[in-house]
Image: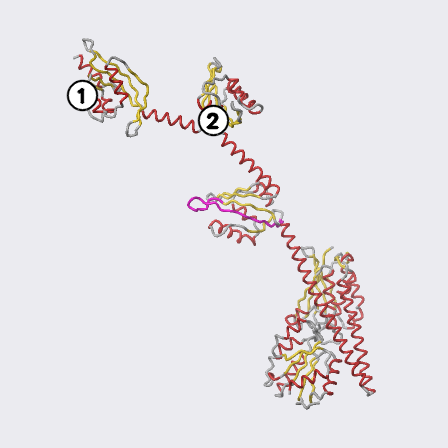
Amino acid sequence: MMTMKKIESACIIDDDPIFIYGTKRMMNEVNFCNQILVFNNGQDAIDGLNEITTRGEDLPEVIFLDLNMPIMNGWEFLEDFVKIPNHNREKVVIYIISSSIDPRDLERIKDYEVVNNYILKPVSPEDLEKVLQNFG
Amino acid sequence: MKTLTTNFLIKDSPMAVAIFDTQMCFISHSDIWSIKFGQGRQTLQGKSLYDIAPNTPKTLRQIHVDCLAGASNSNNGQKFIHPDGTVQWLKWKMKPWRDEEDRIGGLIMVQEDITEEKLKEELLLKAKSVARIGGWEVDMTSNKVYWTQITREIHEVPEDYEPNLEEGINFYKEGWHRNEITRLVTEAMTQGTPWDTELIIITATGREVWVRAKGEAETINGKCVRIYGTFQDIDEKKRMQLEYQTVSDRLAIATHAAKIGIWDYDIVHNNLVWDDNMYKLYGIKPSDFGGVVEAWEAAVHPDDKERSQKGVEMAIAGVQEFNAEFRVIWPNGEIRYIKAESTVRRDTNGNPVRMVGANWDITEDKRAEKKLKNLLDITSEQNNSLLNFAHIVSHNLRSHSSNLSMLSGFLSQEEDENERKNLLDMLGNATESLNETVLHLNEVVQVKTGAIDKMKSVNLLDTISGVQKNLALLLKEKEVTVKVKVAKEMTVNAIPAYLDSILLNLFTNSIKYSSPKRPPVISVKAENEEDGKLVVTFSDNGLGIDLERHGKKLFGMYKTFHKHKDAKGIGLFITKNQMEAMNGQIEVTSAVGVGTNFRLYFQQT
């Protein structure tokens, strides 16, 4: 395995505990990052990221975002995320991870500049390695 | 002395009289002569006639020569056309006079200019001929009939034709026309009533001609001695009139059959005239209507009034023709849709004088259009929900299957016993979730295919009580107050199982998402609406939903808005589908921290 720059902090926003478990496990396998943040819906994530900002800390460098979630879905999260007043917000790379193959969703992603790419579930270790390569 | 007296008598004669010598020079003349023929000169004595009247025609000069030779001459009216084109009619009498020796001393002459009378007469004749008016007269004592030239022309008989009364009557077309003229003539002769009628005659050449026959009888001592009158060829006019009548009859039949109303608005006198169909279209009787434009305005629906009035004004102003649709309210309150088309007629100066138009009822078209639009809405909504459904199937089934494949992948590599147990547990959960999703989808499909013929009249209060009974334990445990204000006899047209399921879902939602800050209160009431619908209002004082955020997806599948362990996002989706399957509707209003208010629209039974 080639040496890659390790990510300091990554964030998973998803309501499915099985997906969270699996993704975390794979992250460890590919030595993805030092720290993993987990939120179960968009609102929790916004609250958590705002809290980090208040503490004067950096936002996670990579966010894996689900679309279908209760309370606040992925789209709504994106609307609110760009309003977070953090100095490194613009460096944050967001990947949408969803099981949706609805062409309307794929089309809609193009409207969000902040989104880097779309990963179709299930996530594989190869997907994570590609993310790391792009990051390095 | 004698001559003087004669001269004096001649001077004051009321006619144009003159005495000439053999050279046709004036010896004496009346004042009238100098006024009429003397170019205004006081005296013409000693002057030659031909110097005074140089345009005396040659033929007349020859007559003078003849008379000076001993002849006499008189004429009751002779037309002369002078070299300059002017026409002169003269009437005269002349003879030579003789001296004591019986020698011809000159001419004595009476002359009159009758040009004016003759021209008038000519004009009258001409007018009669142009108007094709002839005269006729029957002398009852001799049974002799006199026809003028034009009367003969109309009958197409030769100039020397002389009919009697019976022959005259036989020219009228056999049947109604002949019977009618016989009746009229008989009445005139016996009762003295004049007649004026329009009938058909058959001319000598066999042509049918419409004539206007006027006549009256002259009676002496109660005995009819003469009947006379005029006879006019009105064939062309009458046929045009009949043709117009035919066309207008046809139009009347067409407009009647098509229920098209025709109106005619006299703009100058603000007078509106309607045909019978118009009254039918507006549901009023002619006796209810003043015939003025204000009455039309009174019938127009208030919401369409200003627009319609503007349309008429714009048409009169010449901006654009009044072609519009508007509603009218019948006296019984019924609203009808009217389509109007019209044109404005203008005088030669372009001023509007008349507005003529047609109205017809398009209520049925409008209803059909509305129905079609409803159908279209339903179709596009169903199409939408089908797309949604496909999306749900792909998304939800895929998310479970991807979890299953991921977990089984981990399991095949995992050697740690504890971790394997953990993975197996998760595998079990994932399988169960998949099963649940399939059940939900199945439920949705069943609602979608739910047959409308299962609908029946259901008592609303009984159903609510039944649901309350099912939830009695839960309601008691959560200390929920339920207020029901539904009339005992109220029924809705519904599928009983769906109505149960909808109410159960709304109750459990209200309990599930009640506010921890206050004791839960649920109130249910029902009201009949005017349009055949029954509205059930279901409200609680729970957490409420941020509709600005979630409004669009509230009734979507797998949408949840609260952190609750049982929130699955399937209930309202199914509720909405069940309502729609029963031709109903569901609406929601809500405020976060205040409560939620659902309105369910059912069909009354």
Question: Residue B297 at what x, y percent from top left?
Answer: 54, 48
Residue type at mark 1 is Gln
Instruction: Identify which residue is drawn at 50% across, 22% down.
Output: B193
Instruction: Give the x, y percent position of residue A9.
Output: 67, 87
Q: Which residue is mark 1?
A: B45
Q: Position of residue B551 (x, y in %)?
A: 66, 69
Task: Determine whether the residue tagged by mark 1 lies in a helix, strand or loop.
Answer: loop
* Residue B10 falls left or right of residue B488: left
Q: Badge 2: how crowded within 10 Å, few (<14), some, or many (20+)?
A: many
Secondary structure under tag 2 reads: strand
Visible in this render: residue B510?
no
Report the magenta residues as a range: B333-354
Q: Which residue is mark 2?
A: B232
Q: Residue at x 62, y 87 (%)?
A: A58
Q: Quadrant of the N terminus of chain A?
A: bottom right
B95 vs B191, nearest the viewer = B95
Q: Is residue B54 above or below residue A118?
A: above
Q: Describe the colour scheme in one phrase.
A: secondary structure
- Magenta stretch: helix, strand or loop mostly: strand
> In this view of the protein, which residue sits in the foreground, B513 or A67?
A67
Lateral position of residue B358 relative to residue B121, left or right: right
Q: Nearer the viewer, residue B279 or B36?
A: B36
Residue B379's spot in the image, x, y percent?
69, 60
